[in-house]
DNA sequence: AAAACTAATCGTATATTTGCGATTAGAGAT
DNA sequence: ATCTCTAATCGCAAATATACGATTAGTTTT
């Protein structure tokens, strides 16, 4: 990729939102999150039984969700408990809430 | 890309959120949207003057934002007025609000 | 110690995204 | 008709993302 400008000066807020949005940018990951959210608590089990995708692929999706801070996993042998990272989830909720709030509806735009 | 399953049965809601999230998944696009939101009205002008990126690259970002329905552009020769698509913006806001709301905080999770 | 089980990682293939400069298209202005 | 200006599109290169099967790592069970 040719980059004329290596260091575009993004605001931290933009980077934060973009990182999370990117993680949300795939329907499988949305459904994984919805699934975890609908669990009474954390999920211990094989997500391969729930989603018709290869185990390695799911693992990659989980990795990206972890990277964005939206979930956390803790070893609970022989399985792993996957949870929504509630603290970061709240932060993300707030980030997106503010982001979308930032628009004054129909501000006398005579286009 | 090898796909064992061609037609994964995603919920429409998941697809909708993922499409928008994907469009939000790049800091440049977040900043473009923030810029448009901070305009008193729609923006007519050369976004290249605002962002240190090539004109063609900006055009591509705008295309993706348009594709996700977040902005609209109308010809106002010799320029184009770019606006937040307020109607879809509200829909997106609601989609994400519901998505994030869907989490019961600290639901007696003893992990 | 060996077998079994889960989840991560590796290696690979292909698709998509991101970026640029160059060109094109369309509308006004000269 | 020609020139100018804006924004889209084209063509290309490189980086990332997505998916799979195979392998590995780490536990637990036998």
Image (spheres, coloured by chain):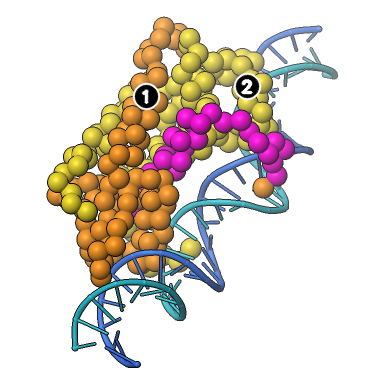
Chain colours: A yellow, B orange, C cyan, D blue
- Return the x and y of residue A57 as percentages of the image width and height: 63, 35
Residue under numbered circle 2: A50
Label 1 lies in what chain?
B
Q: Is disc 1 placed on a helix, strand or loop?
A: helix
Residue at coordinates 40% horizontally, 56% vertically from top-left?
A: B63
Closer to us: D28 or B29: B29
Judge whether residue B8 is colored magenta: yes
Asked if residue A95 is among those painted magenta in the image, a careful observer would answer no
Q: Nearer the viewer, residue A24 or A62?
A: A24
Along the line of sight, the residue nearer the viewer: B20 or A50: B20
Q: Chain of mark 2?
A: A
Of circles 2 and 1, the one toward us is 1
Q: Are marks 2 and 1 in contact (CB under 8 Å)?
A: no
Question: Which residue is rendered at x = 18% and y = 49% of the image?
Answer: A109
Q: Report which residue position mark 1 lands on.
A: B98
Horizontal side of B34 relative to B54 (left or right) equals left
Say above or below: B78 vs B93.
below
Instruction: Give left or right: position of B79 versus B14.
Output: left
Give the magenta-colored segment's residue range: B2-28
Residue A56 visible to the viewer:
no
Residue B40 drawn above or below residue A38: below
Question: Which type of secondary structure does the marked residue at label 2 adopt?
Answer: loop
Q: CA distance from mark 2 to mark 1?
A: 23 Å
Q: Is residue A35 above or below residue B92?
A: above
Crowdedness near tag 2: few (<14), some (14–19) or many (≥20) residues, C-alpha within 10 Å: few
Which quadrant of the structure image shows residue C1? top right
């Amino acid at each position: 990729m040719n980059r004329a400008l290596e260091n575009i000066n993004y605001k931290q807020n933009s980077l934060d939102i973009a990182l999370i949005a990117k993680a949300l940018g795939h329907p499988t990951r949305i459904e994984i999150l919805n699934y975890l959210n609908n669990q009474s608590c954390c999920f211990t089990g094989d997500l391969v039984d729930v989603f018709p995708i290869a185990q390695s692929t799911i693992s990659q999706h989980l990795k990206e969700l972890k990277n964005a801070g939206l979930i956390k996993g803790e070893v609970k042998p022989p399985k792993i408990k996957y949870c929504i990272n509630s603290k970061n989830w709240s932060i993300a909720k707030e980030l997106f809430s503010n982001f979308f709030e930032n628009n004054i509806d129909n501000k006398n735009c005579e286009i």
